[in-house]
Image (cartoon, rainbow, N blue to C red):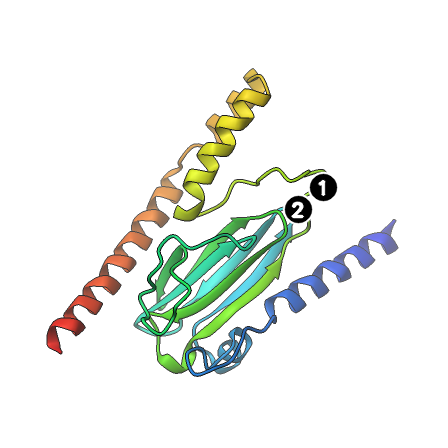
C-alpha cells in the first residue's frame, strides 16, 4: 500500500511539473513563454493542484503594474470579438489582472484549460495560450461542467436549467447548492479583480487621450 501511495504521489508530481511547463506559440505578439517568464522572475502562472475536472492555478505578478491573464475552458469561444491588445485578432476571453501579488484561480473543465497573457504587462513578457490538462471527468458523457468567469455564466444557467428538467431536485442537492453560495472571500476576490480591471481600463483611456 505504501509503495502504491508513493507511485501515485510521483505521478501527480510529474503531471504538475509537465503541465505547468507547457509552451505557447512564440511570435512578435507573444515573444515569451510562461516557463521563460517564471525563470526570469516575470509575470507567470503556476499549476499548484490538478484534480478530476479541476485545476488550481496561481497567477503571479512580480512588479508594480497590472499583469492580465486570460483563460478559456475546453476551447470555449471569446466573450468579446475585440481584445484590449489590437494586435490580437481572435477576441477577448475572461481575464484576471494582478499587480505585484499572487492570486489563486480554480478552474473547472471536462478536459483542459488554457491561459495566456497578451495585455496589461510589459510587451516582452507576453505569452500565447498555454494548455493545462485536468484529470478527465469520468462518465461525463458530453455533459458540460460548470465553467468559471463571465464566459461561463450563461452556459452555467443553461446547464442548471437542463439538469433541473432531467433530474428532480433533492434536499441533499439543495443543501449542497447552499453550501456553495458566495462567501466573503469570494466577494473580496471579485472586488479586487474589478478594481484591477478598472485601473487597467483607465490607464488605456488615459494613454489614448494623450495621443
* Residue 203: % across, % down: 20, 68
Which label belongs to residue 127? Answer: none
Q: Residue at x 21, y 68 (%)?
A: 204
Among numbered discs 1 and 2, the one appearing first in the sequence: 2
The mark tally for this picture is 2
* Residue 54: % across, % down: 59, 48
* Residue 55: % across, % down: 58, 53
Mark 2 nearby-residue class (10 Å; few <14, some 14–19, many ≥20) = some
Mark 1 nearby-residue class (10 Å; few <14, some 14–19, many ≥20) = few
Q: Residue at x 52, y 40 (%)?
A: 146
Numbered disc 2: secondary structure: loop
Asked if the residue under mark 2 is in contact with the one under mark 1, i.e. CB atoms within 8 Å, the reply is yes
| 1 vs 2, front mark | 1
Give the quadrant of the C terminus: bottom left
**Residue beneath disc 1:** 138
Q: Residue at x 38, y 70 (%)?
A: 88
Distance between the alpha carbons at the discs numbered 1 and 2: 8 Å
Q: Quadrant of residue 46?
A: bottom right
Which of 167 and 178 lies nearest the eye of the viewer? Answer: 167
Instruction: Give the side of residue 44 with respect to residue 63, left or right.
Output: right
Residue 50 higher or lower than 182, as above or below: below
Q: Residue at x 81, y 57 (%)?
A: 6
Q: Residue furthest left?
A: 210
* Residue 175: % across, % down: 52, 22
Which label belongs to residue 52? Answer: 2
Which of 188 and 29 lies nearest the eye of the viewer? Answer: 29
Numbered disc 1: secondary structure: loop
Amino acid at each position: 500500500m505504501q509503495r502504491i501511495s508513493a507511485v501515485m504521489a510521483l505521478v501527480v508530481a510529474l503531471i504538475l511539473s509537465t503541465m505547468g511547463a507547457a509552451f505557447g506559440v512564440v511570435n512578435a505578439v507573444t515573444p515569451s513563454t510562461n516557463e521563460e517568464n517564471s525563470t526570469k522572475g516575470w509575470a507567470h502562472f503556476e499549476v499548484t493542484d490538478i484534480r478530476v475536472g479541476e485545476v488550481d492555478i496561481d497567477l503571479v505578478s512580480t512588479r508594480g503594474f497590472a499583469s492580465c491573464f486570460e483563460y478559456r475552458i475546453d476551447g470555449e469561444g471569446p466573450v468579446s470579438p475585440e481584445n484590449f491588445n489590437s494586435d490580437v485578432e481572435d477576441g477577448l476571453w475572461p481575464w484576471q489582472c494582478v499587480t505585484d501579488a499572487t492570486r489563486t484561480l480554480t478552474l473547472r473543465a471536462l478536459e483542459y484549460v488554457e491561459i495566456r497573457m497578451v495585455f496589461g504587462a510589459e510587451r516582452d513578457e507576453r505569452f500565447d495560450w498555454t494548455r493545462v490538462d485536468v484529470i478527465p471527468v469520468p462518465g461525463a458523457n458530453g455533459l458540460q461542467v460548470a465553467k468559471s468567469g463571465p464566459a461561463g455564466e450563461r452556459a452555467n444557467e443553461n446547464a442548471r436549467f437542463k439538469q433541473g428538467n432531467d433530474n428532480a431536485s433533492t434536499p441533499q442537492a439543495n443543501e449542497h447548492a447552499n453550501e456553495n453560495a458566495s462567501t466573503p472571500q469570494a466577494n473580496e476576490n471579485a472586488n479586487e479583480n474589478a478594481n484591477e480591471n478598472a485601473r487597467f481600463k483607465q490607464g488605456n483611456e488615459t494613454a489614448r487621450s494623450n495621443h
